[in-house]
Image: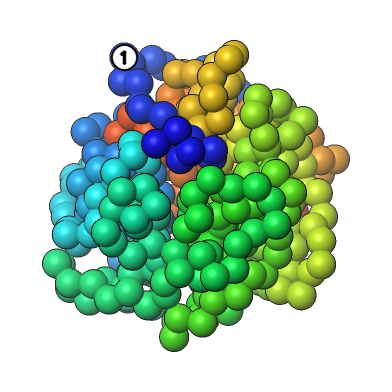
Amino acid sequence: MASVRKVLLLAAVLIVPITAPAASASPACGEPTAAVLVTGLEGASGSTIGPDGALYVTEGAAGRISRVDPKTGEITTFASGLPTAIVGIGGAIDVAFIGSTAYVLVTLVSSDVGGTDVVGIYRVDGPNSFTVVADLGEFSLQNPPSTPFDVPTGVQYALETYRGGFLVTDGHHNRVLQVTRAGAIAELIAFDNIVPTGMAVRGNTVYMAQAGPVPHLAQDGRIVSFGAKSSGVTEVASGARLLVDVEFGRGRLLYALSQGDFPVGEPAGAPAMPNTGSLVEVNADGTVTVVIDGLNQPTSLEFIGNTAYVVTLTGEIWKIDAVSCPPYGMLR
């Protein structure tokens, strides 16, 4: 199964004690403070804010989507019975809503990794009922990428709504796919070996994080932007290692999630070292400023007001208050 480690985050998760991250000052509303809101999630990875204002988080090891109250941390099962992870990462890996309907991105469950399920986008029809609306695995088999690969069906990472449909990053095939709700799939943009990860959308512009190739150096951790008809990308910022997500906070402030320092000598696909992750703010000059560090192998980021919520590989959700504060500005 070594071939599956070609992309980030395929290694086993290391469970380590909770530590208090260090924070940088936010003059408008005080110093950011971080606390653990939730523990015990199984194979947590992607997340979104649902139409009810709650957090929804994928648990790939359990094959479910959990609803998390952002104030109390109360967890309830929103949907279960999805394909589960086979190789440490995979199964349900991200979730998004169009209106009140949830859609789940499922990866690394097909025959090329020893599974029997469909790699694709699943519509949630009920608590235990799903419909495959887009077979991404079959598309990948019929349309292989130009970059080298070991997993023919790809390793899809992030799901984002866009123009009434979806965008999907494939961190292994180094491309972004555009998918309609009817299931039509097309390659929107392709890259060299940059390992595309999380996305955020503002209007018609897509902002995307790049983890960069091993050893995931800070200069390779980039945020780029592109549009629906772009032939290339515009670099927005760089300077944080192993970027795994990007999101807008309040106003027009842009933030990114760095998983942290890559272990020397580890193969492609290993996660960052424990407690080296950080939340960074994007500056107008293309640099980044650390808002809070010491995060333990983070994977996805959401904002509610000026509070950031960070999901980690270790099954936690961190609540970070006083992050996105006035004065607001585009990439201040």
Q: Position of residue 88 (x, y in %)?
A: 33, 36
Where on the picture, by quarter, is residue 219?
A: top right
Residue at x 64%, y 70% (from the top left corner):
187
Image quadrant where one finds the N terminus: top left
Image quadrant where one finds the C terminus: top right
Q: Position of residue 186 (x, y in %)?
A: 60, 75
Amino acid, disc 1: Pro
Q: What residue is shown with label 1?
A: 17
Where on the picture, by quarter, is residue 125?
A: bottom left
Q: Position of residue 153 (x, y in %)?
A: 47, 58
> Which residue is most to the right?
285
Question: Quick check: 95 above or below 182?
Answer: above
Q: Residues within 10 Å of mark 1 (few under 14, many from 20)?
A: few
Horizontal side, residue 96 vs residue 101: left or right: right
Which residue is more in the foreground, 185 or 139?
A: 139
Which residue is more in the foreground, 50 or 183?
A: 183
Which residue is more in the foreground, 118 or 229?
A: 118
